[in-house]
Amino acid sequence: MPLEVFFAVLLAAALHAGWNALVKINAEPIIAMGLIMVCISIVALILIPFVDFPPAQMWPWLIGTLGLHFGYKVFLVKAYTQGDFGQVYPIARGSGPVWVLLASLVLFGAEFTRIQIIAVLLITSGVAILARFKRGKPLTAGFYYAVVTGLWIAGYTMVDGYTVSQIGHLNSFVVWMFFLDGMIATVWAYRYNPQVFVVSLTQHWFVAIGGGAMSMASYWICLWAMTQAPVAIVAALRETSVLFGALLSTYMFKETLGRSRWISAAVICSGLVLIKLA
């Protein structure tokens, strides 16, 4: 992986953690997600005149990824409703790269070196450590929703990666995908509770704008990286966002950086070194 791509994806991971930290506002998960997405759709609408209209061969993939992105949001909200953020987020984000790697190997016959495979598994394992399972404590419904959320993440990651790397028109795809995805999520959140949605947008509009800008920039960078390096490697590297999130929770929310987080950091960093060496 070229050095500039490596650091660009790390920047995307930090931005991803940043907007997730901004989401920590006084609102229900559906409402919080809707606030972010309404700002994303507005930004995308402003950018539409500056990009090409998607070509005909792109639209089936664009429509498909809209369904996958919406499924991801639905199951992520269910996971957050049924489980703790500290477990749901690492499981959902950490399992996605494994599904991408398996699908790339089994379904598409992609070739990876042994070092690349180990690097993906190390990063994923480091992310999973942050889930902090406790012995004797039964798994909640949030765990299963988080695992399924990882499948949705893997689905849209592979579809989006294929589209921008094989069909091209990166900027057109990103802008139109964010515009349409933002509109769908906004309608979903508004219909859930119109009054709460409007009041929350009025109170937290600055958070929504910041989170929307960071979310859009993060995924735009990742899709560009997928045109420069294997999708599975980029997907794994992006999930270092969980590590950045752990660091932000320590300094912003004064949460304790315990032993599990230090172990997780060491494992993730080992994977990062292997990716660069590969």
Image (cartoon, helix red, strand yellow):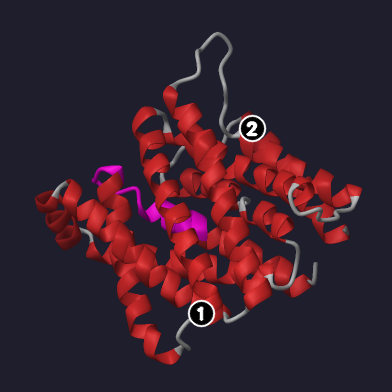
Q: Residues within 10 Å of mark 2 (few under 14, many from 20)?
A: many
**Disc 2 + disc 1, Cβ < 8 Å:** no
Residue 5, image quadrant: bottom right
114 vs 4: above or below: above
Q: Is residue 213 visible?
A: no
Q: Is residue 246 left or right of residue 254?
A: right
Q: Residue at x 31, y 44 (%)?
A: 29
Amino acid type for the residue under numbered disc 1: Ala
Q: Residues within 10 Å of mark 1 (few under 14, many from 20)?
A: few
- What is the x, y in percent for residue 163? 60, 69
Placement of the N terminus among the 4 image quadrants: bottom right
Which one is closest to the eye, mark 2 or mark 1?
1
Q: Residue at x 34, y 64 (%)?
A: 182
Q: Residue at x 50, y 13 (%)?
A: 138
Q: Residue at x 33, y 53 (%)?
A: 33
Residue tagged by mark 1?
A: 56
Placement of the C terminus among the 4 image quadrants: bottom right
Q: Is residue 40 left or right of residue 159?
A: left
Q: Is residue 267 left or right of residue 128?
A: right
Amino acid type for the residue under numbered disc 2: Ile
Query: Element under label 1?
Result: helix
Residue tagged by mark 2?
A: 129
Q: Is residue 22 magenta?
A: yes
268 vs 169: above or below: above
Residue 159 or residue 274, whichever sits in front: 159
- What is the x, y in percent for residue 177? 44, 69
- What is the x, y in percent for residue 274? 84, 52
Query: Which residue reaches farthest left?
Result: 195
Highlighted range, magenta? 16-29
Mark 2 or mark 1, earlier in chain: 1
Q: CA distance from mark 2 to mark 1?
A: 43 Å
Residue 125 or residue 63, whichever sits in front: 63
